[in-house]
Image (cartoon, rainbow, N blue to C red):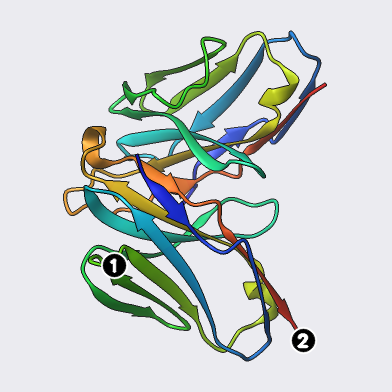
């Protein structure tokens, strides 16, 4: 079975440019999560969706960050304009409806973003 | 908010047993997850605890004490491939939709021959 698919795997761009990260969740999963991971702060939740609707975006650092989920099989995280402090690994994860609260989140391989 | 503490780094020898501790503070505890993350790779699910006690899965076990806000991950018969970061994550039922996990910064385990 295909897991969570993210693209690109690596992105290097100059500050001020727009960056778009893409994610395809596991088919049938109802929840989609965007995380950012850095050495200093670890893995931080940015935003998550349930059935394509954003539920909690309190982790989005500022207005430069936006996320969409136009359908059940695709989501984007956009940074515009990008800044060097946005350099991190961005993970997308998905999970099933969790009636028993024990369904784990499945992570993609991440996008390693470097803003010069 | 939540506070999750794990040791930053641990070392152990191949074949040994290691225990990685995690303490947390939350008023609406609703489950604790352990994930393994090899360098440059995605986190992968290891275990889930919501009730007190020990959950065993092969060489890996996870323990939870809700009254103490404490969990540990026990790795037996260590292998070189167990060198990775181990992330503790807590779910708080006060959070929207009960699906939000808060991760600790992880414990980097180095297994030596």
| Residue that numbered label 1 is attached to | B68
**Tag 1's secondary structure?**
loop
The chain identifier of the residue carrying mark 1 reads: B
From the viewer's perspective, tell me whether residue A46 is left or right of residue B40. left
Instruction: Decide: few, some or many residues near mark 2? Use Cα within 10 Å; few <14, some 14-19, many ≥20.
Output: few
Which marked residue is nearer to the observer: mark 2 or mark 1?
Answer: 1
Is B84 on the left or on the right of A32, as rendered?
A: right
The chain holding disc 2 is: B
Q: Along the line of sight, which residue is nearer the eye, A77 or B67?
A: B67
Location of residue B67 (image quadrant): bottom left
Is A91 located above or below residue B18 in the figure? above
The residue beneath circle 2 is B113
Where residue A92 appears, x then y in whole percent? 50, 36
Q: CA distance from mark 2 to mark 1?
A: 35 Å
Residue drawn at the location 33% of the way across and 26% of the way down: A56
Label 1 crowd bin: few (<14), some (14–19), many (20+), radius 10 Å: few
Q: Residue at x 63, y 91 (%)?
A: B15
Considering depth in this image, is B3 or B73 the residue closer to the camera? B3
Q: Position of residue A113 (x, y in %)?
A: 71, 30
Residue A79 image label? none
């Amino acid at each position: 079975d295909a897991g969570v698919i993210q693209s690109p795997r690596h992105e290097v761009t100059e500050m001020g440019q727009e960056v778009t990260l893409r994610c395809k969740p596991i088919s049938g999963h109802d929840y989609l999560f965007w995380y950012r991971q850095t050495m200093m702060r670890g893995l931080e939740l940015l935003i998550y969706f349930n059935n394509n609707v954003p539920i909690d975006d309190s982790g989005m650092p500022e207005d430069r960050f936006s996320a969409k989920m136009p359908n059940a099989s695709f989501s984007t995280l956009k940074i515009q304009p990008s800044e060097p402090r946005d350099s991190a690994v961005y993970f997308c994860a998905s999970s099933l409806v969790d009636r028993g609260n024990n369904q784990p989140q499945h992570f993609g391989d991440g996008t390693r973003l470097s803003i010069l | 908010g939540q506070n999750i503490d794990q040791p930053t780094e641990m070392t152990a020898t191949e074949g040994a047993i290691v225990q990685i501790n995690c303490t947390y503070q939350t008023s609406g505890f609703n489950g604790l997850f352990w994930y393994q993350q090899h360098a440059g790779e995605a986190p992968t699910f290891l275990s889930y605890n919501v009730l007190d006690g020990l959950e065993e899965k092969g060489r890996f076990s996870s323990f939870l004490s809700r009254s103490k806000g404490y969990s540990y991950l026990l790795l037996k018969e260590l292998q070189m491939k167990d060198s990775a970061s181990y992330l503790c994550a807590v779910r708080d039922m006060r959070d929207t939709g009960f699906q939000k996990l808060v991760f600790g910064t992880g414990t980097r385990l180095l297994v030596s021959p």
